[in-house]
Image: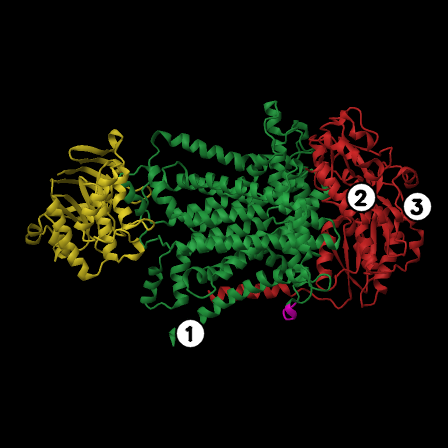
Chain colours: A yellow, B red, C green
Amino acid sequence: MSTVEFSNVSKAFPGGAGKAVDDFNLKIASGEFVSFLGPSGCGKTTSLRMLAGLERNTSGRILIDGVVVAEPESRLFVPPEKRHVGMVFQSYAVWPHMSVFENVAYPLKISKRPKAEIAQRVTEMLAVVELSGLEQRMPSQLSGGQQQRVALARGLVMQPKVLLLDEPLSNLDAKLREKMRVDIRAIQQKLGLTVVYVTHDQVEANTMSDRIVIMRAGHIVQTGTPDEIRRAPVDAFVADFIR
Amino acid sequence: MQKFLCCVLAMILLSSCTKKSDKPEIWIYTSIYKDTVADLQPKLEAKFPQYKFNFFQAGSEEISAKVNAEELAGGTRADILIFSDRFYFEELATKGRFEKLTSPLVKQVPESMKNKDGYYAAVSLPVMVMIYNSEAVATPPKTFKEMSGPEWKNKFTTGSPLASGTNFTTVAFLQKAYGWDWFKALRANDTISEGGNSSVVRRVQTKERPVGWVLLENALRLHEKNSKIKVVYPEDGVILQNNAMAIIKKKADRKPAQDVADWFLGNEGQDSMVRARLMYASMPGRPAPKGAPELTEIMKKAHKWDQSTIDEFMKNRETIKEEFAKIMLQ
Amino acid sequence: MRLRSALSIRSLLLFFAAALIFILCVIPFASLIYRVVSADGDFSIAVFGDVIAAPAVRLAVVNTLKVCISITALSLIVAVPLAWLITRWDLPFASRARSWLSLPFAIPPYVGAIAWIYLANPSTGLFNNVLGAPIFNIYSVTGLIFVETSFLYTFVFLGVTSALDRMDSSFEEAARLSGASPWRVFRDITLPIIRPSLMSGGLLVFLAAVASFGVPALIGGPARIYLLTTQIYNFQRIGSMSGFLKAAALAILLMFVALFLLIASQIVISSKKMQTVSGKTARPSTFSLEKWKWPAFAVVAFFWCVVFVAPVTGILLSSLSRTQGDLALANFTLANWTRILFETDETVRAFRNSLLTAAGAATLASVVAIFVSYISVKTRLKGRAVFDLFSSLPYAIPGTVVALALIMSFSSSFLGVLPSLYNTLTLILIAYFVKYLSFSIKTMSDGYRQIDDVLAEAAHMSGANWSQTLVTIWIPLLMPALIASWFLVFMPALSEMTMTLLLTGPGLETIGTLTFQLQEYADASGGGASVLALIVIATVILINVIVKRVSRGKYGL
């Protein structure tokens, strides 16, 4: 489907000491499932948010599908609403004033699709995330896991170039988390999605990813398949973290 | 958290413990100006060291509202009232809320300036005159009456009888003299009638309306050298107001209050009242306000207070206000 | 053991707060009603009929509705986009702008009204003089609505900015990633989620407008626009007992209308249960103004100049003028300043008293609101809404009537138990507390409403008892709301005039009574009052700066 490229990307927050992300370089192939793994504060979420357009990188450039979406040097910045990426937030961000159907239909409504098409695609998508029949429920009537699926369906419904997931499973209980891991991976495979997945849980990263990017203090420490990293960690930090 | 709450509670309790003195208290509710109170309070305390004097000092309308509320709650705290809404005094006198004044000096107060049964008497006489801004008016008006003429369009302002007692008195006398048609002409001249006397001064000062009727004291109090505000004593008669004094009827001994009332009508009290020379004294033999003619002179033309006029105004109080509101305020 | 003690502290504090509201906000008004219906010795509600039948009252009702609805609508129209611009766009000096835009509330309304008359009266207004034509006429319905809105929009502004701050920003980010433009995000997501804050802000503005007196009297009067408060005032100023009873009766009717509105709004707000603050406070992504950055800033700055700089300049000029309305250089003087600061002995005492009572009332109201809002938002106690309601009632009626009700209840020993508070600063403090408590409760309830219960539950799970949770979880999270609530009470109380005039006594001068003295007697022109108003505004700014310094920029307006 789509490729992603980070090239010398850095981010400094105004007033913050040092850089939150420093010289981040990464190429993600179409259909690849890449996890950013690291302790909190390592810059993984910031990197993801820069890819989404929710943060602006202070230098370097970001490309989606070979097109530059952010390059401060040439004052180029594509706002998030024009990047065509889907995102699932840690807090789900399921809109409390809209029903399940309205939540999932929203991206399609924005792009002014005909009503019939919207209905059809929302139904399909809800089937994919196994929420069929709950269309008219309000978010307050849903469990955490169900809300999470609504968020996933909403992120997928507009067939994004890339799907971004920001610690989507951290608020779920262990059993549900295991099932969702399998489900998300299955959906990704089925739709051939390019996925960037942020987590601090090495099990999630190991079981789902094609490739893992391990980060610490704004830097990439190591990149590789779960196997490669397990077999040859570059240093004690990685070894300790992946264990 | 609890500590904090305790602090707040303690603060409230502490601040509510006011210093209590053993002396009997005398409460005086008055609209006389702070300067005057500051001047006469030490004299009162020197003369009557056995009492503690408390003043509630506010506008006449605030005082009557406060007294009304206290009366509804079982009786006002005031012992002596001194303020300029004569009709309010008349009302409380009729309701039997006043003690008769026993001071022999009451006799010397002009007949028209006291209650016929001796329930209240004026201690001083504020006077309603006209003022104009000399920068904006070349030929000043001479009478109230001429203000209805077309040459004063957009030039005249008055207080509102709905907002202030002295303005009510003025409206009452003028409608008696000139009828409501005169007010209709004022309305046609776009006269602004709003607020009390201070609002009138403000509008004249800013030339928003360069002529207005106002209490003489408000004009004289302006902190200005070479004031641009000049006073006119209308030839068709100034309107004298009554700063009335009365003693509230209470179970407690009224002798102290009577003594104090007597003091107010006596030399010391009267000197204090007119010290700043902003109004006339009610007792003869005091100087007139700064630059004003003698009281006897003024009285010749001034609108007359007599019992039938008071009764008429009392009876028509609401109608006068309503009629005024209908003509001037809508 | 621990559970039991925690439970008892909780119920004790909640009970204390509730009792305070009952004693101070209910009893005085209940007794006012009682006294009015039994004034003639026996029970009679005829006075209510008389009041309703008066044509002037009916006209006043129509005018009040027209004016107050316009003020509310205009406040929302102005304040919501401003709040959105400041919290969600990369506006230059956004955090400064936030403080600046809260400042108009610190201008004492009657002084602000005089300033506007000075600037824009049709015959000699400064603007009209400068322009050489009578373009602005402050004495009009438009003028009245404009001046009121220029103070009152701050309620909505403060409420909505803090709601936007506390709102989980991922709601909006999710919409952006769904392809929604900034406007669509605002319309589809932001607005519906902050609706409770909008409604309570709007309601506050409406009630404030209905209860306001200074501006309608000074500006509505010459324009011949009479509102209910002016009508109540006119009744009261008749002086007679019957006028007094009519004033009280009309105020009571107003109270019932407010009660109805409050109940209706509670039903609407509580029907939408929303908690929108997550534990994680992500830095919200801002929209980029790009080339509109400075034009947008210019618009905000211009607005601020209109609502704050212009009237303050008017006040400043007036404080420096020997004769009001004269702009000649020779007319400028420091005499007003030296007179107030050095030659008036009451100035220091008045400031001390005002600071003491305003700060006391603000603190007490905020503390009580912590508990009362907790009861009404975070518990399922039966009748919890009642406190919120009762505390809002005094706010909806004019200050004179609040003061008169307090006089009736406190002129003799209160309830026959407590020491008499009559003629003490405490009673003045209580008056401010009673009148402005609803600012605190509204602000705090909004605060609670947006904090997810799980945060407190998490604290309970970690073994914290109720009071520990309150101190360690709720209060820190509510801090911005607490600060806002404190200022919302402090600012108007600092220069309050109408209630204080009736409650003052020997040695109890406040800034409000001093202003009145100066205006009514010493210098009707307003020079002295302007000096006081400027000091009041400076005081508020100073306290805000101190709060910001001490909290390192975290809290404050």
- Which residue, given by chain and number where applicable, does mark 3 sit on? B285
Chief SS of the magenta region: loop
Give the letter of the chain under mark 3. B
Quadrant for the N terminus of chain C in the image: bottom left
Label 2 Cα crowd, 10 Å radius (few <14 / some 14-19 / many 20+) = many
Q: Which residue: 65% across, 40% down?
A: C218
Q: Of the residues tagged 1 and 2, which is closer to the observer? A: 2
Q: Amino acid at mark 3?
A: Gly
Label 1 Cα crowd, 10 Å radius (few <14 / some 14-19 / many 20+) = few
- Which residue, given by chain and number where applicable, does mark 2 sit on? B169
Give the letter of the chain under mark 1. C
| Residue C307 against residue C510 in the figure, above or below | above
Mark pair 2, 3: CA separation = 26 Å
Q: Of the residues tagged 1 and 3, which is closer to the observer? A: 1
Q: Which residue: 25% across, 29% down?
A: A74
- Which residue, given by chain and number where applicable, does mark 1 sit on? C5
Give the magenta-colored segment's residue range.
C415-419
The image position of residue C293, as x and y in percent, is: 38, 32
**Secondary structure of the residue carrying numbered label 1:** helix
Mark pair 1, 2: CA separation = 66 Å
The image position of residue C168, as x and y in percent, is: 33, 49
Tell whether position B99 is magenta: no
Say whether disc 2 or disc 3 marks the residue closer to the N-terminus.
2
The image position of residue A96, as x and y in percent, is: 33, 51
Q: Of the residues tagged 2 and 3, which is closer to the observer? A: 2
Q: As drawn, is A206 to the left or to the right of C384?
A: left
